[in-house]
Image (cartoon, helix red, strand yellow):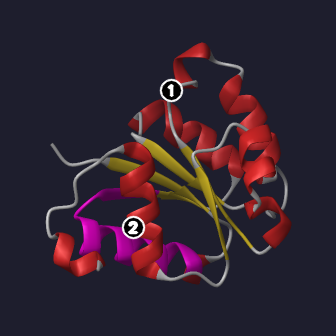
Amino acid sequence: MRKKILLIDDEAIIREVVQSCLEDLARWDVITASSGKEGLIKLIEEKPDAIILDVMMPGMDGLTFLQQLRENPENLSIPVFLLTAKSELTQPQKIAAFGLAGALSKPFDPYELVEQIAIACNWNVEDKNKIK
């Protein structure tokens, strides 16, 4: 069964690049949202296996989304990965403090993104040669 990833980022080009990486390299299904508020709606509709979240977004930022996500006990098991321009948020102590599965700085390496998610979630990638 293919994994389903919810990608929340306000930048269309980032959504497009990340979606292509995850679909082409790992064969995962990607659902996108351009805001935290839209992400909360898609979370309920789609029930993703993991979430990739931008931090700096207008309206509801990523950390507010994360707080609201964690208020529902049903969502506690969903791994969340930050994809952020704020490199201090990718430090191990920050990742642990926010209860994240991982974090990557923008700009990012597409192969590293797929590999980090696969390892953290203990998922197999259909063609492992593609991410080496």
Q: Which residues are magenta?
A: 14-31
Q: Is residue 102 above or below residue 85?
A: above
Q: Which mark is residue 98?
A: none
Residue 77's tag is: 1
Q: Residue 118: image x %, image y %? A: 36, 55
Q: Is residue 25 magenta?
A: yes
In terms of secondary structure, where does tag 1 sit?
Answer: loop
Which sits in the foreground, 23 or 35? Answer: 23
Q: Is residue 70 above or below residue 93?
A: above
Count neighbours of disc 1 (C-alpha within 10 A) and say few if under 14, some if 14 to 19, many if 20 or more. few
Q: Quadrant of residue 9?
A: bottom right
* Quadrant showing the N terminus: top left
Residue in view at x 28 percent, y 58 percent: 28
Q: CA distance from mark 1 to mark 2?
A: 19 Å
Q: Which residue is mark 2?
A: 114
Kind of residue at disc 1: Ser
Q: Residue at x 77, y 75 (%)?
A: 85
Type of secondary structure dominating the magenta stretch:
helix
Q: Residue furthest top?
A: 73
The kind of residue on which mark 2 rests is: Val
Please report the residue visible at 68 percent of the width from the left and 68 percent of the height from the top: 10
Measured as percent of width and height from the top left, residue 21 is found at 37, 76
